[in-house]
Amino acid sequence: MEESLEAPARSLEAAYPHRETQIDALLHLFSSELPSPPAVVVYGPEATGKSSVINAVLGSLQVPHAVVHCQECITARHVFERTVSSCQQTSDTLLDSKANRKHFSARCENVNVLAVELQSLVSELDKFVLVFDGIDQLRDAPATTVAALTRLQESVFALTVVFILRLPPPPERSYSAVGIPHLYFPSYNKEEACNIVACSSSRDALNTPLLADQVSFGAKEQDVEWLWQAFCASVWDTLAQAAANDVVSFRRLAEKMWRPFIKSVEEKSSTPIRDFPRHWLANRSLFSDEHMLIDRIISIGTSKPTEEAATAVNKQAAAPQGQTRGLAPVDESLPKYQEYLLCSAYLASYNPARRDYLVFTRHSEKKRKRKGGATRAARGAKHEQISRRLLKPSSFPLERLLAIFHAIFPIDYVKPTADLHTQIASLTSLRLIVRSGIAAGDVLDPSVKWRVNVGWDFVVAVGRSVGFEISEYILD
């Protein structure tokens, strides 16, 4: 028996690395030479190869099977009817003669009808595996559904049910019955994830023409593969470890960042290809760009990792401690008036109204010293325990918002074609500012108040996109 499973085990381990233990266990559970258990529970985090490995094992052993995606179903009846339909399709592919094909009723109300239909469909087979993928994501199903599916082998002797879950099964459920093996698929660590992505990525993503006079053709391909592996490890350490730590997201992120990275390598022909630290320093703005983690329908283009971008990052790193460092520019740029209105809304929410005159006048408060050599703000800072930016934004009337807008707008005269109320309505539709108060539903009510609905990092990026440093006007 071990010799008959050795060939499929080698091919499966080559196709799915770092899953040798799980592949060996599944091969023995579904082998045609051994009886299979009534049910098998396979669980593990998302994107760990559970569904792919099970389908590949059943396909290599040529075991008849059907897969039901439970996340596409809503009720238990929906699951039962989808199960019978999948088993019918598998039975049609196994039976050559159309006259021998068996038809089932379109309605499958409960587990008893499901057992009768499955018995008529798989009675002529020695072994049949029914896979319920994502059974824990079933939306509206009775609590006894899993217990009933687990005991289907009592009516259909050739049937084995496989449950695929994302979370560990609770001990009080029917997953923990006697005789049901559990198989765990752990998450990939850094070495395993980098090895899978470096080996399984499509060749089209790596075929970027380098300069022909750098190295020979054979050495060029080896150098590119070495650079791709080092690049994957760096992507994991900078971005993927915290935000894209599964293999699917990690591969998508690495292939998205590879194009601008290798383009910079092509431009710097004097730097050796294997000098990865120097390439990383030239592209550190790319590795710190969190916008690469966002999937978009419309491509907005990636920031070019040139020397100018690196110089800008160095300038931000050398900024004073009172300023926010390393903030990327806002890609979803708003109109100019809306950007200033959003900054005005943030100042109105986090600055007290009684300090507006002191903040927005030309003579700053820190220049008017009293006895003792300290400013009024410095003496008052001793009693403040929590920064206002950490508290909930306060409400403000519309008149105060417009007053702050006219105070910070760089031009004294606002064009009459600029309808500020329309700009405020656009910000409200984007949920950047929201109405608050008892009369929040009536826009025309003069008692309606507003508050900002964005954070500090976002509003700083918006202000810097128009040359407005909001940190000079905010009071801590």
Image (cartoon, grey):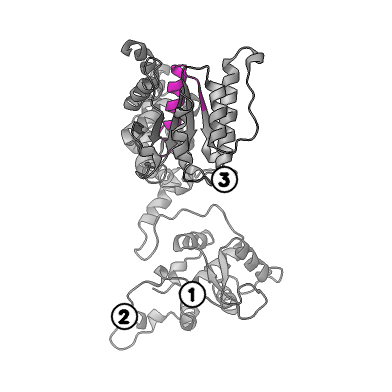
Determine which residue is flagged by label 3: 300
Determine which residue is flagged by label 1: 394
Tell me the magenta residue range.
45-66
| Circle 3: element type | loop
Q: Please report whichever mark, 3 or 1, sits nearer to the chain's N-terminal start.
A: 3
Where is residue 130 shown, x and y percent of the image? 49, 28
Report if residue 198 lies within the magenta region.
no
Q: Is 461 rendered above or below residue 243?
A: below
Report if residue 59 lies within the magenta region.
yes
The tag on residue 374 is none
Where is residue 431 shown, x and y percent of the image? 57, 62
Task: Point out the image quarter for the N terminus.
Answer: top left
Give, as a three-letter code, the residue at label 3. Ile
| CA separation in Å, label 1 and label 2 | 20 Å
What residue appears at the point 38 percent right and 84 percent down from the top-left corner?
368
Question: Is the Cβ of the residue at disc 3 closer than 8 Å to that at disc 1?
Answer: no
Binning the other alpha carbons within 10 Å of mark 3 as few (below 14), some (14 to 19) or many (20 upward) gives few
Q: Please report whichever mark, 1 or 2, sits nearer to the chain's N-terminal start.
A: 2
What residue appears at the point 36 percent right and 80 percent down from the top-left corner?
377
| CA separation in Å, label 2 and label 3 | 46 Å
Determine which residue is flagged by label 2: 383
Q: Is 410 rendered above or below residue 121?
A: below
Q: Locate residue 400 relative to residue 41 in the image: left or right.
A: right
